[in-house]
């Protein structure tokens, strides 16, 4: 029988949560809309202006900030043809139809273009099943004529309000990258905000869909790549039908040819979204486990069993169990779990929760690689996930030696009312996000221990975030706590919490040796990037003497006090405990291995061959006064968001200026004639302007010289200040045509002026009669060239104006120039 999704698994957001992502922020996290509000206010004070984002301008740098990274010549050629257009210039609207930010959000709204970001689009496709998860990302809720939008993204563990304009990369006057069905903009703007967050469109090529979902929701994720069908289906079924409402994605293995279509209809190295997981029965009573999967391209479907055209398996009996089944070429298809495990490489589950609150704290480990974070859980929380977030590799170039993720030990403990430490969880990994997920966590005071084995020297900032049912607070411990002693207390709690599960378990990560009943013993093991030994002596009159000799020690480093010794000797007097911790050091080859010999003796403390070292015994860690630094992330973000320029706003007078068809045909014909000599129109407009100014300064005998100097200097200033509108270009081209006409008339009547040259100047006069007409012809030709280039800019204004601005804007900041 069909297993329909229970109603409890749907996300039932409150009205506020449905409309605004800010409703999930903890109070101390604050808001980050200062930049957007200031830009909006500036535009409101200048009616008719449009917003152009100077931080992510519509130019080549926003497409790819290092074009040497594009090694494929076909891609390089294709991307070089991209221009930037606003929605009204590429959307084909029917009479009475209007541009919308949202219409009806559906997975089929998303179509992939020439950008290889299928992982991101498959994530959007999965989110589009629950449209409020998309809508709440938009601070701006409706279409804006001025082109200003604000979009929330969770970048490296922190929610950020990304401000973008609506200039979209296009080819052949259609979006070059993602595009949507109809006249909606939400897909294009989300992709642009994602590209801005990571530096360029090229930076977001290729990725893990589960990681993209983390960036879109802030929720933790888990990847699963076990290919055994039962295990895979159990994982998918649990995350789809458990009532948690997890979002599922999957991906196929790569081949030599990127995203090549296989014979079975799937694409290699491609990301898909999983829309449904079902158990159904055929008429013979046999149970089948099937999945509904969607290609973000909206085409290219599975051709095997349970495909749309499989009339043998899809009959009235089976279709009645799956009401959502449709025979359409829309990119969605069904397949069995056996075929899924055969052709797909892995899956990811984004563990989004209905009642989540989000908080984060950022800090820098400049002089150290250790940090202690205090986490206050204000009420009992059904679920809580803390994450350690490193800067994403996308911010850096392809050369991995410049930046790579560092290994990190990440531990969560609780301080009990009696001052003892209770182990909660721990992780060790070398990933962008390292997470500890817990359920039914009581309110109280928790501590996060973070130690990073740095593999790079470029960036030492980290963000710790919390995704929980209830409000939380963060603070950074600055003084009063010894990290290593705190770590030893945490390891003791880990050992005592896990020892009961180790008895009789050959796969246990820890082992225990007991002596003298349960009073004296040793627990040791390796986990979380640590090799540890916990010695305890709860007797009243017996000392423990332990000698350790490592026969093999690979990938771990000894504490400083033992580094120069062949044997480690430990003496534990009565009622004392000690934890010995060896830390991970294999940051190059990642290999760890150890073996040791040991001898343990129990004796009177007078007989112990060495004196005990009191400094290594476990002691109370709350003795000193603790100095905390409150979470200032909200204040810091507000200060940073005010440190920006408002950029340039171009008055949008294009609606009152029409480009006639004969102009387009004429300019295209003339442009084709000079095309062999023009590689970059924007650069040539800049050069011809400077050349014309230089010519006018040298030769000043033309009666139109003063008019031309006024015209060209006015153009230069308007380009330099980035306020050259299409209406102004129309006027300048007409004035240049008038000037050319006057110059031609002057050239025609010129010979009559020189017939009366005085005899004493006959030789000079004869020379001038040849020189001046030649220079006048050059002058007319140069002026015509200027007029042609400006006319070309007028006709192709949206495609060229921003590149022209970039050529003229050399040194001074835009806002200073505009004031001048």
Image: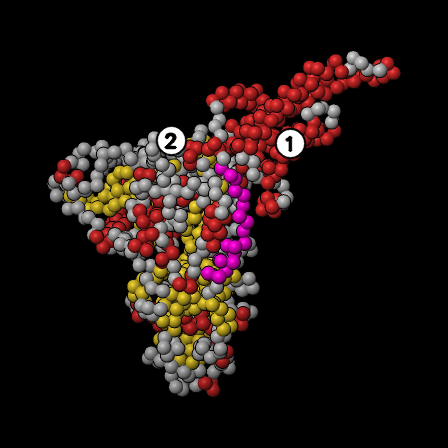
Q: Nearer the viewer, residue 352 or 269?
A: 352
Q: Tell which of 395 and 452 is nearer to you.
A: 395
Residue 150, percent across and down? 43, 48
Q: x%, y% of residue 324?
A: 21, 41
Q: Is residue 248 visible?
A: no
Write down the quadrant of residue 509 in the picture: bottom left
Magenta stretch: includes residue 645 = yes
Residue in view at x 38 percent, y 52 percent = 214
Is 337 left, or right, of 272 in this rendering?
A: left
Label 2 sits on residue: 92
Residue 712 bears which disc, if any? Answer: 1
Residue at 67%, 21% in the rendered image: 743
Q: Position of residue 448 (x, y in %)?
A: 42, 66
Which one is closest to the eye, mark 2 or mark 1? Answer: 1
Judge by depth and name the residue closer to the eye, 525 or 114: 114
Disc 2 versus disc 1: distance between alpha carbons?
A: 37 Å
Numbered range of the magenta stretch: 634-652
């Amino acid at each position: 029988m069909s297993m329909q999704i229970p109603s409890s698994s749907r996300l039932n957001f409150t009205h506020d949560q449905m409309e605004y992502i800010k409703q999930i922020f903890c109070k101390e996290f604050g808001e980050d809309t200062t930049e957007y509000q200031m830009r909006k206010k500036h535009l409101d004070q200048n009616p008719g202006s449009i917003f152009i984002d100077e931080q992510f301008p519509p130019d080549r740098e926003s497409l790819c900030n290092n074009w040497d990274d594009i090694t494929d010549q076909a891609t390089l050629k294709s991307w070089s043809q991209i221009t930037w257009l606003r929605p009204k210039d590429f959307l084909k609207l029917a009479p009475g139809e209007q541009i919308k930010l949202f219409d009806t959000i559906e997975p089929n709204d998303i179509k992939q273009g020439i950008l290889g970001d299928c992982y991101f689009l498959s994530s959007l496709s999965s989110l589009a099943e629950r449209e409020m998860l998309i809508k709440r990302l938009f601070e701006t809720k409706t279409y804006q004529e001025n082109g200003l939008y604000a979009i929330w993204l969770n970048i490296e563990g922190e929610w950020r309000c990304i401000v973008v304009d609506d200039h979209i990369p296009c080819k052949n006057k259609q979006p070059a990258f993602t595009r949507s069905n109809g006249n909606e903009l939400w897909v294009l703007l989300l992709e642009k905000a994602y590209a801005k967050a990571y530096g360029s469109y090229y930076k977001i090529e290729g990725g893990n869909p589960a990681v993209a979902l983390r960036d879109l929701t802030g929720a933790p994720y888990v990847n699963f790549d076990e290919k055994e069908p039962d295990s895979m289906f159990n994982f998918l079924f649990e995350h789809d039908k458990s009532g948690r409402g997890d979002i599922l994605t999957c991906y196929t293995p790569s081949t030599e040819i990127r995203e090549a279509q296989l014979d079975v209809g799937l694409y290699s190295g491609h990301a898909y979204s999983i829309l449904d997981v079902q158990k159904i029965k055929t008429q013979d009573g046999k149970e089948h486990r099937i999945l509904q999967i969607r290609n973000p391209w909206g085409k290219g479907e599975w051709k095997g069993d349970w495909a749309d055209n499989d009339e043998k398996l899809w009959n009235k009996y089976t279709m009645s169990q799956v009401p959502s089944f449709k025979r359409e070429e829309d990119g969605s298809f069904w397949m069995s779990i056996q075929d899924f495990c055969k052709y797909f490489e892995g899956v990811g589950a984004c563990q989004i929760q209905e009642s989540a609150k989000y908080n984060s704290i950022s800090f820098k480990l400049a002089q150290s690689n250790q940090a202690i974070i205090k986490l206050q859980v204000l009420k009992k929380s059904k679920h809580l996930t803390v994450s350690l977030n490193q800067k994403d590799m996308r911010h850096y170039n392809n050369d991995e030696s410049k930046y790579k993720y560092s290994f990190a030990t990440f531990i969560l403990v609780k301080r009990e009312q009696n001052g003892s430490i209770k182990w909660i969880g721990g992780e060790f990994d070398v990933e962008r996000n390292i997470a500890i997920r817990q359920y039914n966590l009581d309110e109280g005071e928790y501590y996060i221990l973070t130690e990073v084995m740095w593999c790079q020297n470029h960036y030492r900032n980290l963000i710790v975030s919390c995704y929980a049912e209830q409000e939380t607070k963060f603070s950074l411990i600055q003084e009063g706590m010894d990290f290593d002693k705190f770590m030893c207390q945490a390891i003791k709690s880990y050992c005592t919490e896990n020892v009961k599960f180790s008895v009789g378990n050959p796969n246990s990560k820890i082992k225990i040796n007991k002596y003298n009943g349960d009073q004296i013993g040793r627990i040791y093991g390796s986990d979380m990037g640590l090799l540890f030994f916990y010695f305890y002596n709860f007797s009243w009159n017996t000392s423990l003497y332990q000698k350790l000799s490592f026969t093999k020690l690979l990938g771990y480093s000894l504490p400083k006090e033992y580094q120069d010794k062949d044997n480690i000797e430990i003496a534990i007097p009565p009622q004392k405990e000690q934890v010995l911790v060896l830390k991970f050091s294999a940051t190059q080859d990642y290999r760890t291995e150890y073996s040791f010999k040991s001898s343990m003796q129990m004796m009177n403390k007078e007989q112990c061959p060495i004196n005990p070292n009191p400094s290594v015994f476990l002691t109370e860690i709350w003795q000193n006064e603790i100095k905390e630094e409150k979470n200032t992330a909200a204040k810091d973000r507000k200060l940073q968001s005010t440190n920006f320029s408002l950029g340039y706003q171009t008055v949008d007078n294009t609606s009152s200026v029409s480009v006639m068809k004969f102009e387009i045909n004429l300019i295209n014909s003339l442009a084709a004639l000079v095309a062999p000599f023009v590689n970059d129109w924007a650069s040539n407009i800049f050069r011809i302007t400077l050349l014309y100014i230089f010519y006018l300064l040298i030769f000043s005998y033309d009666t139109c010289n003063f008019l031309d100097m006024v015209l060209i200097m006015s153009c230069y200033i308007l380009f330099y200040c980035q306020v050259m509108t299409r209406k102004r270009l129309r006027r300048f081209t007409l004035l240049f045509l008038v000037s050319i006409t006057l110059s031609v008339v002057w050239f025609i009547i010129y010979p009559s002026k020189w017939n009366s040259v005085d005899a004493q100047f006959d030789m000079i006069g004869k020379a001038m009669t040849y020189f001046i007409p030649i220079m006048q012809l050059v002058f007319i030709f140069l002026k015509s060239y200027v007029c042609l280039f400006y006319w070309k800019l007028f006709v192709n204004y949206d495609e060229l104006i921003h590149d022209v601005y970039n050529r003229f804007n050399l040194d001074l900041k835009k806002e200073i120039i505009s004031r001048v």
